Image: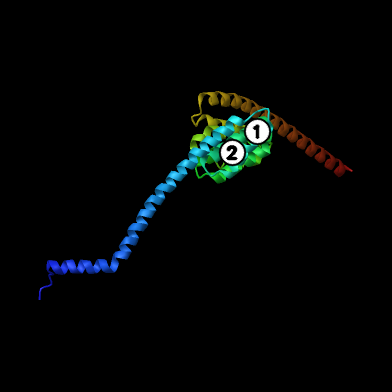
């Protein structure tokens, strides 16, 4: 018996197969088309939202008035409600306004902290952490500022991070580590302007370090002399008691 089918038999089997499966085939095609056009619609919708957010952001920036503290409120609301990259930009700009115009460092820190939850970009997060650390420095929260700087993962920010770290350590009178931080900053390819600034601060920190070490040496010497004096006095008193 031949296992090969004739042309008519093959056509018949194909018709039978299609009769049983045409609904499934049509469903697959429909789902595929819906997915394709749905994806294109979603991409188009997201693009429209980004363009809309961009326009709104520019309008709000134009409304900022250094003489009107309330002019930043709409920008803050926009940053809170928007879910595009422009919400991050809005938080950055609003935080700058808070610092420069309102002197509200705590409010600026809150805005920048909120930015961290709006992005997965390590670059943007590094910028946020650096700005938060600067604000914590202004608030004299030195330990918190040092801890925040450790969260900066982008190596390209090493000069800036170690520059700030040096400033904090100087405020904490830890001149030895401040000098080390400034040296790391200088070895991390800073910009020319930043390099000159760091060098000046490094010289000052080195002077304070040498002065501190000299004072410590002087204090240690005075303490050693006082201890020797006390021991000599104790020995003298003990000898006197033995004679009596």
Badge 2 is on which residue? Answer: 91
Q: Residue at x 75, y 35 (%)?
A: 223
10 relative to 211, above or below: below
Numbered disc 1: secondary structure: helix
Classify residue 98 by image quadrant: top right
Foreground mark, 2 or 1, reads: 1
Is mark 2 in CB contact (under 8 Å) with mark 1?
A: no
| Farthest left residue in view | 1
| Farthest bottom residue in view | 1
Q: Which mark is residue 71?
A: 1
Can residue 177 be spotted in the picture? no
Q: Position of residue 118 (x, y in %)?
A: 55, 44
Quadrant position of the C terminus in the picture = top right
Distance from the alpha carbon under mark 2 to that under mark 1 = 14 Å
Q: Residue at x 65, y 33 (%)?
A: 71
Q: Which mark is residue 185?
A: none
């Amino acid at each position: 018996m031949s296992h090969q089918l004739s042309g008519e038999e093959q056509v018949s089997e194909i018709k039978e197969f299609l009769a049983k499966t045409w609904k499934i085939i049509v469903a697959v095609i429909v789902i595929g088309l819906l997915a394709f056009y749905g994806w294109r619609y979603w991409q188009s919708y997201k693009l429209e939202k980004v363009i809309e957010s961009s326009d709104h952001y520019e309008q709000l920036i134009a409304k900022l008035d250094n003489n009107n503290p309330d002019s930043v409120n709409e920008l803050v609301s926009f940053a809170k409600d928007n879910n595009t990259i422009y919400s991050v930009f809005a938080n950055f700009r609003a935080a700058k306004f808070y610092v420069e115009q309102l002197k509200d460092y705590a409010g600026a820190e809150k805005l920048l902290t909120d930015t961290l939850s709006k992005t997965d970009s390590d670059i943007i997060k590094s910028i946020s952490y650096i700005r938060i650390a600067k604000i914590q420095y202004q608030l004299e929260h030195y330990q918190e500022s040092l801890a925040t700087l450790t969260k900066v993962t982008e190596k390209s920010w090493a000069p800036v991070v170690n520059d700030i770290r040096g400033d904090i350590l100087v405020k904490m009178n830890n001149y030895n580590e401040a000098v080390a931080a400034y040296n790391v900053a200088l070895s991390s390819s800073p910009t020319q302007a930043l390099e000159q600034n760091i060098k000046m601060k490094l010289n000052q920190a080195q002077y304070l370090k040498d002065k501190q070490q000299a004072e410590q040496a002087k204090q240690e010497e005075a303490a050693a002399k006082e201890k020797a004096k006390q021991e000599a006095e104790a020995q003298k008193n003990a000898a006197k008691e033995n004679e009596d």
